Amino acid sequence: MIKVSGLRKAYGSVVAVDGVDLHVREGEIFGVLGQSGAGKSTLLRCVNLLERPTGGSVTVGGRELTALGDRELRQARQGIGMIHQHFALLSSRTVAGNVAFPLEIMGVPRGERVRRVEELLDLVGLAGKAGAYPAQLSGGQKQRVGIARALAGRPSVLLSDEATSALDPGTTQSILALLKRLNRDFGLTILLITHEMDVIRAVCDSAAIMSAGRIEEAGRIADLLARPGSRLTEELFPLPPAEPGSVTITFTGAYSGRADEAVVSQVVRKFDVDVNILGGALEDVAGVSAGRLRVRLTGGESEAALGYLRDRGLLVEVAAR
Amino acid sequence: MTWSDMSPLLWQATGQTAQIVAWSTLFTVLFGLPLGVALVGTDRGGLFPAPVANRVLGAVVNVGRSLPFIVLMIAVMPVTRLIIGTTIGAGAAAVPLTIGAAPFFARLVETALRGVGRDVVQAAQAMGASRGTIVAKVLLPEALPGLVAALTVTIVTLVSYSAMAGVIGGGGLGDLAIRYGYQRFETGLMIVTVVVLVVIVQAVQSLGDAVSRRLTRR
Ligand SMILES: Nc1ncnc2c1ncn2[C@@H]1O[C@H](COP(=O)(O)OP(=O)(O)O)[C@@H](O)[C@H]1O
Ligand SMILES: [Mg+2]
């Protein structure tokens, strides 16, 4: 749905985005995780060409945006929704007026506009707030207006720039739940950027880690979990640094959903090993439960025990001695 | 001079002042508002960046603002005669007043427009809004309280400039104060004239403040 190739954006000598390739599939929620200054916002703003890339190409829904002229680009943008960290609502317009704004830009006739605004406010749970001004709303309500506004043109793609970063944790969860619902009910493809792991954990099907303008790792979360040495897995399940010889077991892929199977006690019984648990975490990620366990195996047939675990479909990584 | 002598003179002069200020306000907005939009728009990172045009406009505005009004008033007399056909009367006074006030108003407009957040402008761009739409539906409405405040200050300035325009026969309260108050030593009339001017300025300012406050939705 979104394809970014070789994207570069430089501001003078500062290279904000440094050769990024990204592929967001239709109907998925794709999260880009990175620290502040990593270039996430610049990347996102290059996707709808709010920033003209210095190099590379951007294709959304089969249209190469980087090849379009001004007028066609404006047209194309009407099919791409965007929500913002600080909501970016017009303070001089009511909630209904804000949601109607993109419809005015598209030239939708007044009667239809009124109907559509009502529908959209219903959808985001703000039916009673049509006449309120943004200043009278809470942060979560403002972002709901932002979402309703972004959906006005029935976009196939939604871009989200830290949409929950200015919100408290409870409100964050409700906004994420709304995004998830829109994704599920309408097949809305969402590309979001965030510096919060929790956002990735809560809603994303795929993720990328960005740092210093580059993508370090990207893919479906389920696949990344099964990939040895994955940084994303590290971030999802922060464990203490691996001591030499310690074993990290990731319950995922074929094993997801069965993380609670008594695999550790089976190993103890079958291979006569001692298991020291050094750390562990269990999380629901991308809709499935997954987890990591760091242990030390001593005595008995530890090699055979590791083989047994691998055969059960677990990712087993042994830290070098 | 008794009150009944003064009263008709005052009414007539107030009417002339109102007329002068109304016309010059109209033309000041007509020229100053687009100029203010252009000052913001042509700036680096603006809606239609044009660094050279920006610098030229900025210089023109600064020259207009640094000329003492009294000098400007006399200097533009040939222009006034060209446009109005005479250099005397309300219409003639509106020409130097507009030339004097438009650059001033443009700067105030510029400041008000710069107060509109970059993020709302970009949000509109992300929706596919054209630059004209962004000016008409984002910049101006969002800056409206500030624009009303700018207009208020400008009208107050025009009222005081219009009194000065009385010197060269522009008519109005300034003219009255000079002809009767100063040249004929009618101190009473001069004081009343000043009081009327103060009341007008107060009224304009209070009205402007009230409107600006009502429009503020932040
Ligand atoms: N308009 C700009 N002009 C100059 N430098 C910029 C601009 N926008 C972003 N940058 C720089 O690009 C880098 C990435 O910024 P940004 O994309 O905002 O990162 P993030 O969203 O990940 O915090 C930063 O070093 C920032 O200073
Ligand atoms: Mg950012």
Image (cartoon, coloured by chain):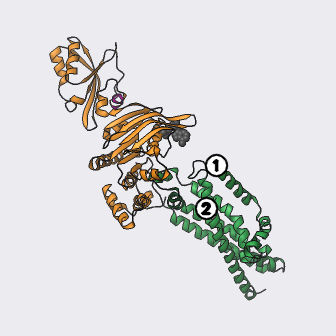
Q: Does the segment drawn in magenta span residue B148?
A: no
SS type, badge 1: helix
Horizontal side, residue A301 vs residue A207: left or right: left
Which of the 4 quarters of the picture holds residue B188? Answer: bottom right
Is B15 or B56 nearer to us in this picture?
Answer: B56
| Residue type, numbered disc 1 | Pro
Q: Which mark is residue B34?
A: 2
Residue A13, image x and y in percent? 57, 34
Residue bearing the label numbered 1: B51
Q: Which residues are magenta?
A: A232-243
Which of the 4 quarters of the picture holds residue A225? Answer: top left
Above/below status of B99 relative to A219: below
Which color was chain A given? orange
Q: Circle 2 marks a residue in which chain?
A: B
Above/below status of A26 relative to A245: below
Q: Does the segment drawn in magenta span residue A242?
A: yes
Above/below status of A233 relative to B211: above
Number of disc labels: 2
Q: Is mark 1 within 8 Å of ligand 1?
A: no
| Residue type, numbered disc 2 | Pro
Q: Which mark is residue A305?
A: none
Horizontal side, residue A299 vs residue B43: left or right: left
State the separation of the CA atoms marked 1 and 2: 17 Å
SS type, badge 2: helix
Residue appearing at x 59%, y 68% in the figure? B208
Which color was chain B given? green
Number of other residues with Cα within 10 Å of mark 2, as a class: few under 14, some 14 to 19, many 20 or more: some
Residue A24, image x and y in percent? 35, 39
Is residue A286 something that shows in the picture? yes
